[in-house]
Image (cartoon, grey):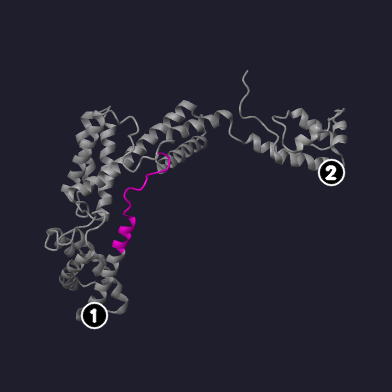
């Protein structure tokens, strides 16, 4: 019978405990060997090797003879033995290695997510006192989750590509709505691929309803995301890629280390954001001296400062003469939450007339956003 590769070894900690027992008993290694019934030349070497942790897989009888010679009991080394017995079994270790192989060639964050999912799923099963899944089931579960994470990441990148290619410029909050909608669309497409394909259209229509509200993305933006993901899904389906991890895209070609930086625009974005914030602050310093704001209590000035920042954000994504820009300004003026805190609707409209042209002029200093996330200066 083949011996397991993971067996009990005499560790340095155990050897240290044994040596303490021998010294407490006042024995030399030679006398200890004699007390163990081992005599002859070199008999003391066994005690020395045990104390240095050099005996591979020592038998329980050897440990018992050593402790008996010292007139000690197993309580002296019980902590070390219990820590060994608490370790994962050989089959558990091998299963964990098989799970790790599933995610070895995935980007770093996805690999960590798969490991975390496996740990939490196994812990949940133990809490519910259910039978522990065998190695095949556990690996299958991890592979399925890894596949879903890889494609979810690819879908997020695809949605960003649709936003940039179509020049949608939805704004940060609505871009998140588009990302969430895209994730729903992908789940529906994938879940209806092998079963209930006739329900796909109805489910897609149901998924879009929560986003068709005044605060949601524009219907044409939702339609663009849906059409783009449908095309992306059909291309992957025809290439039979949906049941395997997709090949790394540009910037993902170092598996296990996470996404490698594409042409790094992080520093450019940081500089752009800092410049924008400085321009907005300069604009506010000019606006706060307007006669209209002279009678506003000082404690309410931050409320108007936030309004100026909102105007700038609106113009970053919609042209001043656009219907959407006018709608958002009117929504700010009639917002009951801010009206109750002293924001005068008439003054909101007046400030918008002053701030928006000035900000549109200031934006020319910024230039286009490095990632194309805002409306270029002068674009309608």
Residue at x 82%, y 38% (from the top left corner)? 72
Q: In which quarter of the image is the C terminus?
A: bottom left
Q: Quadrant of the N terminus?
A: top right
Indicate the position of residue 111 as horizontal and vertical percent values: 43, 40
Magenta segment range? 255-273
Magenta span includes 271: yes
Indicate the position of residue 22 as horizontal and vertical percent values: 83, 40
Residue that carries the numbered disc 1 in the rendered image? 289
With respect to residue 176, does 346 lie above or below? below
Q: Quadrant of residue 8?
A: top right
Sequence-wise, the earlier of marks 1 and 2 is 2
Q: In which quarter of the image is residue 26?
A: top right
Residue at x 80%, y 33% (from the top left corner)? 45
Magenta span includes 235: no
Question: Which mark is drawn over residue 355?
Answer: none
Q: In the rendered image, is residue 341 in sight?
A: no
Question: Which mark is drawn over residue 24?
Answer: 2
Residue at x 17%, y 59% (from the top left corner)? 318
How packed mark 1 is, by other alpha carbons closer than 10 Å (few <14, some 14-19, many 20 or more), is few
């Amino acid at each position: 019978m083949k011996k397991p590769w993971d067996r009990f070894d005499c560790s340095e900690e155990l050897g240290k405990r044994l040596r303490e027992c021998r010294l407490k008993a006042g024995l030399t290694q030679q006398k200890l060997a004699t007390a163990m019934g081992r005599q002859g030349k070199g008999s003391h070497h066994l005690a020395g090797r045990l104390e240095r942790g050099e005996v591979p897989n020592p038998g329980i009888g050897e440990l018992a003879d050593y402790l008996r010679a010292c007139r000690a009991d197993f309580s002296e080394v019980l902590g070390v033995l219990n820590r060994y017995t608490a370790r994962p079994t050989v089959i558990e270790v091998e299963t964990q290695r098989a799970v790790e192989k599933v995610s070895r060639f995935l980007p770093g964050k996805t690999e960590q997510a798969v490991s975390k999912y496996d740990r939490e799923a196994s812990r949940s099963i133990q809490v519910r006192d259910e039978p522990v899944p065998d190695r095949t089931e556990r690996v299958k579960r991890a592979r399925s989750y890894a596949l879903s994470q890889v494609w979810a990441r690819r879908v997020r990148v695809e949605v960003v590509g649709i936003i940039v290619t179509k020049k949608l410029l939805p704004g940060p909050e609505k871009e998140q709505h588009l990302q969430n909608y895209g994730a729903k669309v992908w789940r529906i497409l994938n879940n209806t691929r092998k079963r209930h394909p006739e329900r796909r259209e109805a489910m897609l229509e149901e998924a879009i309803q929560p986003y068709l509200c005044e605060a949601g993305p524009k219907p044409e933006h939702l339609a663009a995301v849906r059409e783009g993901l449908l095309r992306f899904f059909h291309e992957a389906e025809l290439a039979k890629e949906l049941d395997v991890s997709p090949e790394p895209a540009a910037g993902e070609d170092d598996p296990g280390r996470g996404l490698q930086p594409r042409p790094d625009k992080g520093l450019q974005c940081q500089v752009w954001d800092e410049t924008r914030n400085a321009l907005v602050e300069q604009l506010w310093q000019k606006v706060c001296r307007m006669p209209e704001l002279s009678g506003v209590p000082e404690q309410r000035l931050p409320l108007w400062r936030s309004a100026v920042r909102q105007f700038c954000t609106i113009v970053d994504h919609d042209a001043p003469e656009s219907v959407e820009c006018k709608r958002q300004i009117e929504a700010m003026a009639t917002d009951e939450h801010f009206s109750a805190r002293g924001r005068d609707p008439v003054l909101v409209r007046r400030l918008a007339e002053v701030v928006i042209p000035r900000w549109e002029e200031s934006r020319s200093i910024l230039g286009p956003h490095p990632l194309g996330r805002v409306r270029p200066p002068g674009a309608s």
